[in-house]
Image (cartoon, helix red, strand yellow):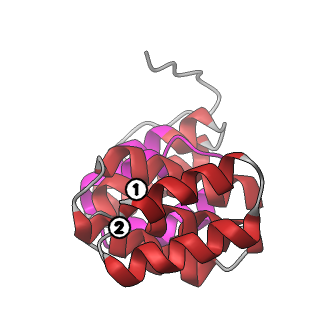
């Protein structure tokens, strides 16, 4: 499509006005234009319009024109750069189709574990990774408390289980 080629040229020559104009034309002629939608997502990310970033992300996912893993990494990169994980956490709490994929990647990001904690009830398959994350972050007591909550055993069962938070555990 000629507008997509012009969009690429305008982007490479740092012509934001032209790029936006060509993206609008490309999208008007072809609403599924991946180039136009990716351009809009990057503009929203640059402007800090995180609700729009997530909406654009969902539209691109619906197009099925790009690998979901690559797009998930790009979305997470937007929030890593901003340092504001809140909008992404709120989005994952809505349990979108890509929620598992996003949470899997978020476990290895510098997201505060307190923010991850709220997602574990929605995605119980990640309890083990959450416990590993707590231990890796040196929060052994918190990991033990979370494990007790996840295990859902009667309190009497825990009195007989030994626990020593000073033992160093290493995961490979």
Element assignment for label 2: loop
Element assignment for label 1: helix
Q: Nearer the viewer, residue 18 or 57?
A: 18
Q: Position of residue 24 (x, y in %)?
A: 52, 80
The image shows residue 167, relative to residue 76, as above or below, that is: above
Q: Which of pointers 1 and 2 lies earlier in the amino acid sequence?
A: 2
Q: Residue at x 55, y 33 (%)?
A: 164
Q: Residue at x 61, y 76 (%)?
A: 21
The image shows residue 146, relative to residue 163, as above or below, that is: below
Membership of 117 in magenta stretch:
yes
Q: Mark 1 packing: few (<14 Cα in 10 Å), some, or many (20+)?
A: many
User: Can you see residue 95?
Assistant: no
Q: Magenta stretch?
A: 103-132
Label 1 to label 2, Cα distance in Å? 28 Å
Task: Work out which quarter of the rendered image holds the N terminus and state it.
Answer: bottom left
Of circles 1 and 2, the one toward us is 2
Q: Nearer the viewer, residue 40 or 113?
A: 40
43 sits left or right of 1 in the view: right
């Amino acid at each position: 499509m000629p507008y997509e080629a012009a969009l690429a040229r305008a982007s490479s020559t740092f012509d934001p006005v032209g790029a936006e104009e060509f993206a609008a034309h490309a999208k008007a002629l072809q609403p599924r234009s991946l180039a136009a939608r990716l351009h809009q997502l990057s503009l929203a990310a640059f402007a800090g319009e995180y609700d729009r970033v997530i909406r654009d992300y969902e539209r691109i996912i619906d197009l099925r024109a790009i690998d979901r893993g690559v797009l998930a990494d790009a979305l997470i990169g937007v929030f890593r750069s901003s340092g504001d994980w809140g909008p992404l956490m709120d989005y994952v709490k809505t349990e979108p189709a890509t929620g598992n994929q996003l949470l899997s990647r978020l476990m290895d990001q510098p997201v505060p574990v307190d923010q991850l904690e709220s997602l574990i009830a929605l995605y119980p398959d990640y309890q083990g990774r959450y416990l590993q994350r707590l231990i890796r972050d040196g929060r052994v007591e918190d990991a033990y408390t979370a494990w007790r909550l996840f295990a859902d055993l009667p309190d009497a069962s825990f009195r007989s289980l030994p626990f020593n938070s000073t033992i160093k555990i290493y995961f490979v």
